[in-house]
């Protein structure tokens, strides 16, 4: 974010330092003698490619072998990355870095606990209501499926839709909700899921504190490892990745929070029994483009059809969803994201699903940073290609 961006900027001695503790990293000048010049040794292109490939292979093996235990550490790194700007502001006021980091971690924990304590009773009540109404929803779905198939049978004849198909589909429709409920309950209640939640709740704050306390040191250390020849290029691309990623994380977090508050409050006020859960789900899933809106809209309309005996209630729920889409598309997203985030929606969706398929929850957390990095590097190499003789050479006579 902002503090991280300044930390990276300060590491480059050819850029101005603004509002941050000066980070002095000796950069080679034209007259400076680099280690390669002093020894007369120069890296070959094969050695450079071998180094890049080795780093990629090591990273892939680490993710493959330790994906099940890396989630708390990646979450701690994301937490430290997000809290570095306010922590830096506190250090400018004279607070030691360790105390500022501890204060920020405690503030985040207090906010999460307060949010959980306020919503926990309401969420538990609505989950109980959902479990009790599963048989009712299953019966309604069965009747709806039977009516639809009967209409199709009357329209196309018994040769296309026969009685056996109608009974089979309606029976399966009735059991779908029960299967879904048992699957979700089994996943949530499994020991591995509980272990992951406990590890996230305990390990993430501790590791996040140490990373946040030592964040400037880590940035300087990584900057000192950059090869002399490509140090300026790597710094420029790192700053671009940081600009896009920080804008996306900050803007998307605000958008998700505002949409979750709007949908939860509006659907509950409109009289939808499970409006709080559906609204929170729609808002929190909106970080995946279109998924949150579609999931929340379909769920809300389906529950409204099952709950309200007349169409007026369904129309009210539909109006709430339409207003939410207007606010999302024309007010919230342009205000907090705009054109600063160069991450196309399709690219974000692909990255999230690909990361989840490859590494599970860990892949989902790493998807956006990796997508931002790949996007920046792709644009960089595209500019290099458009300026190269490979593109600019005229056709042969």
Image (tube, rainbow, N blue to C red):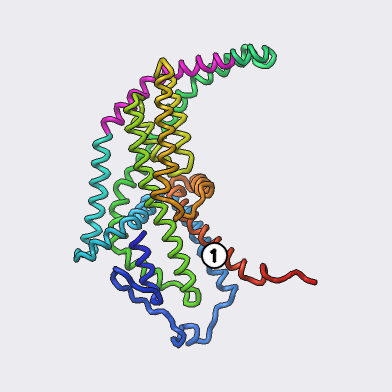
Residue 209 point in image, percent of width and height = 28, 57
Residue 189 point in image, percent of width and height = 37, 33
The answer to which image quadrant residue 90 occupies is: bottom left
Query: Image quadrant for the C terminus?
Result: bottom right
Query: Image quadrant for the N terminus?
Result: bottom left
- Any magenta on residue 341? no
Q: Is residue 114 above or below residue 26?
A: above
Q: Is residue 92 above or below residue 127?
A: below
Q: Which residues are magenta?
A: 120-149
Say if residue 358 shows up in the picture: no
Report the front residue among 366 and 346. 346
Circle 1 SS class? helix
Residue 259 point in image, percent of width and height = 37, 39
Q: Residue at image x 44%, y 37%?
A: 325
Q: Which residue is mark 1?
A: 380
Judged left or right of residue 248, residue 155 is: right
- Any magenta on residue 129? yes
The answer to which image quadrant residue 215 occupies is: bottom left
Report the front residue among 60 and 141. 141
Report the front residue among 22 and 16. 16
């Amino acid at each position: 974010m902002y503090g991280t961006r300044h930390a990276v900027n300060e590491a480059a001695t050819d850029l101005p330092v603004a509002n941050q503790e000066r980070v002095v990293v000796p950069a080679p000048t034209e007259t400076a003698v680099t280690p390669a010049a002093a020894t007369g040794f120069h890296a070959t292109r094969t050695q450079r490619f071998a180094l890049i490939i080795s780093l990629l292979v090591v990273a892939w093996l680490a993710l493959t072998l330790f994906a099940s235990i890396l989630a708390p550490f990646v979450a701690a790194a994301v937490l430290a990355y997000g809290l570095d700007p306010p922590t830096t502001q506190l250090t400018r006021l004279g607070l030691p870095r360790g105390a500022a980091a501890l204060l920020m971690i405690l503030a985040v924990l207090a906010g999460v606990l307060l949010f959980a304590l306020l919503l926990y009773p309401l969420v538990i009540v609505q989950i109980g209501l959902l479990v009790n109404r599963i048989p009712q929803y299953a019966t309604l779905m069965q009747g709806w499926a039977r009516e639809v198939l009967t209409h199709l049978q009357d329209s196309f004849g018994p040769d296309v839709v026969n009685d056996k198909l109608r009974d089979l589909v309606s029976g399966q429709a009735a059991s779908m909700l029960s299967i879904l409920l048992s699957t979700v309950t089994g996943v949530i209640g499994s020991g591995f899921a509980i272990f992951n939640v406990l590890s996230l709740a305990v390990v993430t704050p501790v590791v996040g504190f140490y990373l946040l306390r030592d964040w400037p040191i880590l940035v300087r250390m990584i900057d000192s490892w950059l090869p002399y020849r490509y140090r300026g290029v790597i710094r420029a691309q790192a700053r671009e990745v940081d600009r896009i990623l920080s804008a996306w994380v900050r803007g998307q977090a605000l958008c998700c929070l505002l949409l979750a508050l709007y949908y939860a409050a509006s659907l509950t006020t409109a009289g939808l029994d499970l409006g709080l859960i559906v609204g929170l789900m729609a808002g929190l899933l909106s970080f995946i483009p279109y998924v949150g809106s579609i999931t929340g809209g379909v769920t809300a309309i389906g529950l409204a059809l099952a709950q309200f005996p007349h169409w007026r209630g369904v129309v009210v729920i539909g109006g709430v969803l339409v207003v939410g889409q207007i606010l999302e598309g024309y007010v919230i997203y342009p205000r907090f994201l705009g054109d600063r985030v160069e991450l196309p929606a399709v690219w974000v969706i692909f990255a999230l699903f690909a990361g989840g398929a490859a590494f599970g929850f860990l892949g989902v957390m790493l998807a956006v940073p990796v997508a931002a990095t790949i996007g920046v590097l792709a644009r960089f190499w595209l500019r290099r290609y458009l300026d190269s003789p490979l593109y600019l050479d005229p056709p042969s006579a």
